[in-house]
Each structure stands twice: as structure tokens, then as C-alpha cells.
Amino acid sequence: MTVFDILLEKAQEFHGEMCPGIVLGTRMTMAGLRGLGMDPLQKNGNLVVYVEIDRCAVDAIQAITGVSLGKRTLKHINCGKFAGTFVDTRLHKAVRVSLLHKWPDKPQGLMEFGKITRSAAEEDLFRIQEVSITIPPEDMPGFPTRMVPCSRCDEQIMDGKEEIIDGVPVCKNCAHDSYYSIITC
């Protein structure tokens, strides 16, 4: 069994099924970790990964690397792109892996794409770039850097995510249109 097969199986088990995104995410993860000189079969405690989509590939990245939102080692910035930036926080090195645009944009072509993705040359699938990234201290893994209550809803805001409005801290939900509407109090 190859390293790819081992990692693909791990990703499939985590995700619950095999699909093109799991194959793609496995390949992305292998490329990103290789760019950092990290072994995908070993736990990499200095790894933070920024993902730019909320699709199946992210499950593969999470399953293989062990990064997670709860550990603050998986960062989600939804740009709608099959891309991820793999960061070695100890060496301050980062590699961004992004899917080249020449692949199918219709669901009907995705299953064939999944087959092609397994054997396609890496350079035909991805753009791999060494990039510079600074992770602010309040976004690093570990305990919260600070906590303040929202002056409007009184809910706790952690790690500098508040906005200051009229000189007082306000959470993003109170400061802007929230993703939810309160029905009952």
C-alpha cells in the first residue's frame, strides 16, 4: 500500500465516503506537507492550515493532518477556492496549494475528475507557491489572549474579535447583520 493509499483511506474514513474532493484534498495535503518538509504519516504539532473553501477537500486535510477548528490549527477563510495554505509555525514557512482552473465546472464532470485526480501529475492539478503569512498572536493555538463582554448582548468575545463602536466593545453579530434572527427571548 502506498503512502497516498494510506492517507486516502484515512480521509475517506473520516469523511464517510469516497468522492473527488477527498482525492483532491489528499493530494493537496501531500503537496503542502512536502513543501514544508513534514511527513504526512507523522503528527505535525507546528502545523496550521488555512483553507479557502468549505467542501470535502477540507475533511481530507483535517483527517490527514489532525488540524481542527477547536485546536485553532485549522483556519477557514471562505473564498470559494480549492486552496489551502500550510504553515509551519516553528520555521515561519508557508506553502499555498491551489487547484488550477482547467478542471470541470459542471457536476457531471466531477466523477471523471475524481478518477483523473488520482493519477494526474501534480503540476497539472495544482499551483504550489511558497508564500509569506503572519498569524496574529490572537489567532494562534492556545488559550484566549483576552476576553471582553459585548456591550450590547453581554456575550463573551474572545481573542480580539470585537469591534469598538462609540468607545465600547461590540460583537460582530451586534455590529453588523447577524447570520441569525432572535425569535424568542
Image: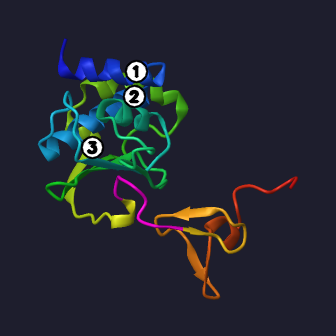
Q: Is residue 22 left or right of residue 184?
A: left
Question: Viewer-proximal residue, 42 or 112?
Answer: 42
Residues at discs 1 and 2 in contact (Cβ within 8 Å)? yes
Name the residue rendered at 50%, 43% in the picture: 54
Mark 2 is surrounded, within 10 Å at the Cα level, by few (under 14), some (14 to 19) or many (20 or more) other residues, namely: many
Is residue 162 inside the magenta stretch? Answer: no
- Residue 113 in view here: no
Residue 5 in which image quadrant:
top left
Q: Which mark is residue 22?
A: 2
Pointer 3 or 2: first along the chain: 2
Q: CA distance from mark 1 to mark 2?
A: 7 Å
Image quadrant occupied by the C terminus: bottom right
Q: In this picture, which residue range is highlighted in magenta?
A: 140-147
Residue at 37% x, 25% y is 11
Which comes sooner in the sequence, label 1 or label 2?
A: 1
Q: Which residue is mark 3?
A: 126
Q: In the image, which disc is placed on residue 12? A: 1
